[in-house]
Image (cartoon, helix red, strand yellow):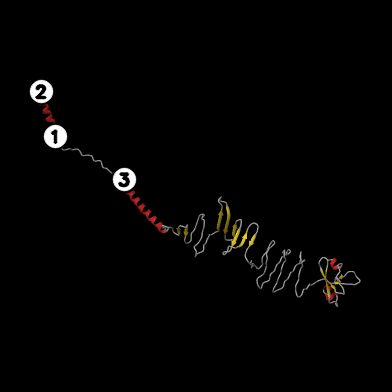
Amino acid sequence: MDRSATLDTEELKMTREQYILATQQNSLPRTEHPQFYPVGIYGWRKRCLYFFVLLLLVTMIVNMAMTIWILKVMNFTVDGMGNLRVTKKGIRLEGISEFLLPLYVKEIHSRKDSPLVLQSDRNVTVNARNHMGQLTGQLTVGADAVEAQCKRFEVRASEGGKVLFSADEDEIVIGADRLKVTGTEGAVFGHSVETPHIRAEPSQDLKLESPTRSLVMEAPRGVQVNAAAGDLKATCRKELHLQSTEGEIFLNADTIRLGNLPVGSFSSSSSSSSFSSSSSSSSPSSSAPRQTIYELCVCPNGKLYLSPAGAGSTCQSSSNICLWS
């Protein structure tokens, strides 16, 4: 019993000393400095971050200012941009507009009170293509010429749609009521011309001329040449043919003169009349001074000559004028 009490007293003493020592140790001041660990960005990293934030802010402000300036200059609105307006019927351009690339549209028209002007420094070309993309028609307006490439070209009147001019590979048709040629040299035709009426302007002469070839006028029902207030003159170098296949050639005038007809001298003993070869026999007065009446004779080939009139006909088909003509 004594031994166990002694052990308990020693254990209690040791526990008390440990408590005192622990209490005294906690109450003593600490001589070591505490270590602090800062949280965040400091130093040059912080300065760089502030610089980038400031640069981003300046960029945003400049970008917003430039956007507002572009909207103001380009005149952006709810309906469109600048002279361009988007409507229910399509796109409307006001003022002068320039296109740097090809323009594909279905219809182009101007306002009712203003014309439509297409202008270019070189030329203006309008192309028409089919669904395969092949070129079917082209109109080019250049500085030197206006060219149209198509199967058929037509010019119509504004009222009624009458065809005034049309051209294709086979023919050219002029549908105007009157074709007026104002050139000093007139109109030159390389081939035949078919027309129902040719006339000159009032107080002007009408002249049909073929300088190097022949001039032929044909009509199935007749050719009418009329000069109401002037003379009618037909001049040729070789022969003048008036031919009527079915009918007659009718000359209706107060006086019909045939000049420079050869004159034959008729002799009753001779079977033919002879033609005087002298230059003075070309007129009736020189061949027969006392002869004042002559007979107009026609050779079988159609040539005319004069023969002195007698009691009977003095025309003979065997005359030298007919044989040597």
Q: Residue at x 13, y 32 (%)?
A: 19
The amino acid beneath tag 1 is Thr
Closer to us: 63 or 203: 203
Q: CA distance from mark 2 to mark 3?
A: 72 Å
* Residue 23 image label: 1
Q: CA distance from mark 1 to mark 3?
A: 47 Å
Where is 281 relative to 158, above or below? below
Q: Name the side, left or right, on which 210 lies relative to 110.
A: right
Closer to us: 265 or 50: 265
Where is 151 relative to 11, above or below? below
When asked about the image quadrant of residue 279, the answer is bottom right
Which mark lies nearer to you, 2 or 3? 2
Which mark lies nearer to you, 2 or 1? 2
At numbered mark 2, what does the secondary structure look like: helix, strand or loop?
Answer: helix
View extreme (right): residue: 269
Which mark lies nearer to you, 1 or 3? 1
* Residue 4 image label: 2
| Nearer-N-terminus badge (2/1) | 2
Q: Give the percent coordinates (x, y) of residue 53.
A: 33, 49
Q: Name the side, left or right, on which 4 lies relative to 200.
A: left
Q: Give the percent coordinates (x, y) of residue 159.
A: 57, 65
Q: CA distance from mark 2 to mark 1?
A: 29 Å
Q: Give the percent coordinates (x, y) of residue 127.
A: 56, 55
At numbered mark 1, what does the secondary structure look like: helix, strand or loop?
Answer: helix
Count of residue discs: 3
* Residue 45 image label: 3
At numbered mark 3, what does the secondary structure look like: helix, strand or loop?
Answer: helix
Q: Residue at x 57, y 53 (%)?
A: 135
| Nearer-N-terminus badge (1/3) | 1
The amino acid beneath tag 2 is Ser
